[in-house]
Amino acid sequence: MLSRSMAQAENTRGGEGAAPVESQATTAPASAGDDAANAAQLGAPALDPELVADRERTGAEVSDAELEREVAALLFASPEPLSEAKLAALLLGTPQVRVRMALDALATRLLASGLPWELRQIAGGFQLYTSAALADTVGRLSKARKDEKVSPAGLETLAIVAYRQPVTKGEIEAIRGVQVGPILRTLVDRGLVKVAGRSDDPGRPLLYGTTKRFLDSFALGSLDDLPRDGELLRD
């Protein structure tokens, strides 16, 4: 349970080339009722009628530039593609024709900016991606994250060190029932565990403890923030 709790504390999007979003023929603006129905079918949040009415009354005051910024922010924050209907719902009933215009403007702006981002239409929605030309560069980040991942056995060992520190290798092995020498060396190499001194036991074995990097990696302010027995039992 200790290692599972710690594991819970532990993808830059990219992909193969695809052209930026192409303009498509637009239709007449949909009414708030139509947008709400379409949004409901696509799993968008339920619309507050009063908020929708307020947005429709003031929609003309929301400039195209500001709407483009709002669309860009939603796409950046979303882990999944967003359809026009869902965007319209999240923008409190903004007509889909204006959402489409904002998407087209954003795609054009990104293409002209020279920045390594592009807007793609995928899986019935729209999503921001890094440029395919930089796939190798972005791939290094994914590989680095994979290399930094701690194995389940490493997490178990790390949990014992965190809760029992300062602790000797022999004490860890007595708890886990297996040899932990190689795992301890790996944790030390990754900066998650450090030698914290020597025990007074016969042979003066090394004592191990966690590091500041361990706290940073698991978003802990201090060792006092480690889950206690009661919290682990609830999990």
Image (tube, grey):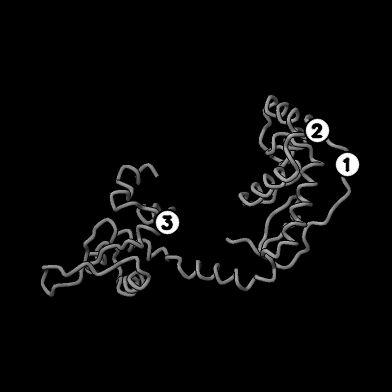
Q: Viewed as shown, does residue 115 lie left or right of 60?
A: left
Asked if the residue at tag 2 contacts the one at tag 3, i.e. Cβ–Cβ closer than 8 Å, the answer is: no
Q: Between disc 3 and disc 1, whose residue precedes?
A: 3
In the image, 230 versus 120, the foreground residue is 120
- Mark in front: 3 vs 1: 1
Quarter-wise, where is residue 52 in the image? top right
- Residue 155, compared with residue 135, is above or below; it is above
Q: Residue at x 32, y 61 (%)?
A: 212
Binning the other alpha carbons within 10 Å of mark 3 as few (below 14), some (14 to 19) or many (20 upward) gives some
Residue at figure coordinates x 59%, y 61% from the top left = 12
Instruction: Read off the residue under disc 1.
Output: 27
Callout 3 secondary element: helix
The residue lying furthest to the top in this view is 50
Cα distance, mark 3 to mark 2? 44 Å
Q: Amino acid at mark 3?
A: Ala
* CA distance separating discs 2 and 1: 13 Å
Task: Find disc 3 in the rendering and name its residue.
Answer: 7
- Figure quadrant of residue 47: top right
Q: Position of residue 152 (x, y in %)?
A: 41, 63
Residue nearest the viewer, comparing 6 with 20: 20
Name the amino acid type tagged 1.
Thr
**Residue 185 x, y percent position in the rendering:** 32, 74
Binning the other alpha carbons within 10 Å of mark 1 as few (below 14), some (14 to 19) or many (20 upward) gives few
| 203 displayed left or right of 15 | left
User: Which numbered mark, 2 or 1, is in the foreground of this view?
Assistant: 1
Q: Secondary structure at mark 2?
A: helix
Residue 212 numbered tag? none
- The numbered mark, 2 or 1, whose residue comes first in the sequence reads 1
Q: Residue at coordinates 37% horizontally, 56% vertically from top-left? A: 3
Res 4 → quadrant: bottom left
Report the amino acid beneath label 2.
Answer: Asp
Q: Secondary structure at mark 1?
A: loop
